[in-house]
């Protein structure tokens, strides 16, 4: 980790100086665009999964440490630098301990389709019928209960002391869970999709003082969960034998099974009316600032990766002599080639051709007889973003003789 930060600190500026914007446009391929879009989408889906969990806040705090380390190096804070250099192994252990529940959820419960495309929280008509029937059976038998239908919002951070079930929805199971003899009757049932995920869950209470005084803790809990999430909650009152539906902090009494079913159909995602809206365009522009940020970060990562993937290649390049004095001419066999080793981005080097490189030697200051000329990188012109690693020979000998009268006549 320390080596990576040093590379970021010392190497990034040099790499970005070597690769200019026009070079990046030359290096960019359609495969790179696809790669950037895929990685951006993965980061965005990871953000959606983490944003309602404590993990996101912890990760953001930990990601600030490398920035503080770089700042401490620049300002020369030796104690902070020493502490952060020795802190990374501890941070890795702490991450595993803190996020063990999230890691277990990812490895055990989150499938690839649900991660990339979102979980399916849609209730089928069969599941709705079973839930409605169970609610009115409980009301007829004067059995109290709370049935929460989870939608898009993650409720893990909002509910407490839940008991995992992961069972299929059935009237008998729901009624038996809330039976006074059941150890799971005290609390709420959480239904996610077509599965009963949790039982005996404790819900946050509604803090509003406008609720009727005869409504107790069960009603306040049912309304409370809908105030802070998009979930809906059915409240079955054992005292009055009635069924109420809470949604977005409001509570409505349902006299008949058909009324409750229509209420659930109205709020269930599978039955939401599109109202002529283009669903895909709506999803595209949803969370636009966050998506733009992830796209920018991935583009920076692409520039960095292209910059650090350096390579070397060698060519034998012909020497071009120019500005020879009018009264002199090259004699003998002057050197014809220079072996040049070039370094730069592997992408640039792979598309480089020998005729794009030139070795030019200025002979304006030579004299008659033997001349020794020292070559340097300035004699070698390369493509943008490519530099000279080495070349040979570094010195060449040239024999120049006066132009004979015969050469002048010719």
Image: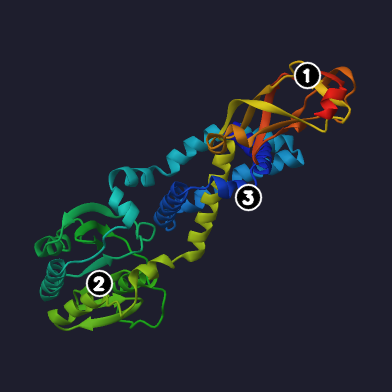
Badge nearest the viewer, 1 or 2 = 1
Q: Position of residue 400 (x, y in %)?
A: 84, 20
Q: In this picture, is 281 found above or below 327? A: below
Of helix, strand and loop, which one carries label 2? loop
Determine crowd level at label 3: few under 14, some 14-19, many 20+ residues with C-alpha closer than 10 A: few
Q: Residue at x 31, y 69 (%)?
A: 231
Q: Nearer the viewer, residue 177 or 276?
A: 276
| Quadrant location, the C terminus | top right
Q: Residue at x 49, y 36 (%)?
A: 92
Residue 64 can be seen, yes or no:
no
Q: Marks 2 and 1: in contact by CB < 8 Å?
A: no
The quadrant holding residue 397 is top right
SS of the residue at dot 3? helix
The earlier-in-sequence mark between 2 and 3 is 3
Q: Label 3 belongs to which residue?
A: 21
Which one is in front in this view, the residue at disc 2 or the one at disc 3? Answer: 3
Horizontal and vertical percent position of residue 80: 69, 38
- Observer-nearest residue: 279 or 217? 279
Q: What residue is disc 2 on?
A: 268
Instruction: Determine whether, in the image, residue 140 is placed left or right of residue 342.
Output: left
- From the viewer's side, name the closer residue of 77 and 308: 308
| Callout 2 crowding tier (Cα within 10 Å): few <14, some 14–19, many ≥20 | many
Label 1: element kind? strand
Q: Earlier in the sequence, mark 1 or mark 3?
A: 3
- The residue that disc 1 covers is 395
- Tell me the tag on residue 136: none
Mark 2 → mark 3, Cα distance in angstroms = 49 Å
Q: Quadrant of residue 236?
A: bottom left
The answer to whether the residues at label 2 and label 3 have Cβ atoms under 8 Å apart is: no
Q: Nearer the viewer, residue 107 or 337?
A: 337
The colouring scheme, among rainbow, by chain, secondary structure or one colour, is rainbow
Left or right of 155: which side holds 242? Answer: left
């Amino acid at each position: 980790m320390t080596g990576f930060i040093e590379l970021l600190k010392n190497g990034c500026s040099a790499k970005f100086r070597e690769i200019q914007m026009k070079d990046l446009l030359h290096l960019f391929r359609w495969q790179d665009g696809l790669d950037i879009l895929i990685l951006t989408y993965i980061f965005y889906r990871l953000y959606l999964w983490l944003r309602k969990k404590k993990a996101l806040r912890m990760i953001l705090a930990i990601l600030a440490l490398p920035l503080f380390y770089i700042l401490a190096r620049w300002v020369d804070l030796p104690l902070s630098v020493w502490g952060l250099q020795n802190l990374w192994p501890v941070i890795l252990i702490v991450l595993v301990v803190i996020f063990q529940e999230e890691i277990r959820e990812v490895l055990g419960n989150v499938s690839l389709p649900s991660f990339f495309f979102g979980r399916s929280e849609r209730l089928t008509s069969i599941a709705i019928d079973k839930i409605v029937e169970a609610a009115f059976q409980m009301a007829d038998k004067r059995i109290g209960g709370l049935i929460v239908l989870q939608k898009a919002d993650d409720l893990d951070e909002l509910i407490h002391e839940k008991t995992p079930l992961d069972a299929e929805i059935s009237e008998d199971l729901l009624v038996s869970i809330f039976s006074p003899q059941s150890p799971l009757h005290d609390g709420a049932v959480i239904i996610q999709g077509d599965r009963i995920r949790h039982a005996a869950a404790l819900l946050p209470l509604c803090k509003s003082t406008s609720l009727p005084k005869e409504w107790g803790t069960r009603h306040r809990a049912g309304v409370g969960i809908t105030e802070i999430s998009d979930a809906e909650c059915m409240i079955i009152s054992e005292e009055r034998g009635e069924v109420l539906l809470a949604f977005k902090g409001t509570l409505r009494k349902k006299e008949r099974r058909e009324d409750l079913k229509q209420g659930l159909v109205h709020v269930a995602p599978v039955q939401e009316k599109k109202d002529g809206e283009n669903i895909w365009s709506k999803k595209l522009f949803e969370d636009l600032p966050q998506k733009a940020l992830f796209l920018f970060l991935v583009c920076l990562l692409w520039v960095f990766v292209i910059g650090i993937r350096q390579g070397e290649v060698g060519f034998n390049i012909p020497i071009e002599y120019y500005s020879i004095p009018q009264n002199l001419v090259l004699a003998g066999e002057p050197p014809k080639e220079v072996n040049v080793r070039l370094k730069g981005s592997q992408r640039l080097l792979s598309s480089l051709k020998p005729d794009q490189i030139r070795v030019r030697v200025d002979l304006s200051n030579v004299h008659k007889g033997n001349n020794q000329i020292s070559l340097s990188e300035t004699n070698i012109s390369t493509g943008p973003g490519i530099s000279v690693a080495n070349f040979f020979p570094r010195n060449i000998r040239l024999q120049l003789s006066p132009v004979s009268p015969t050469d002048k006549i010719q």
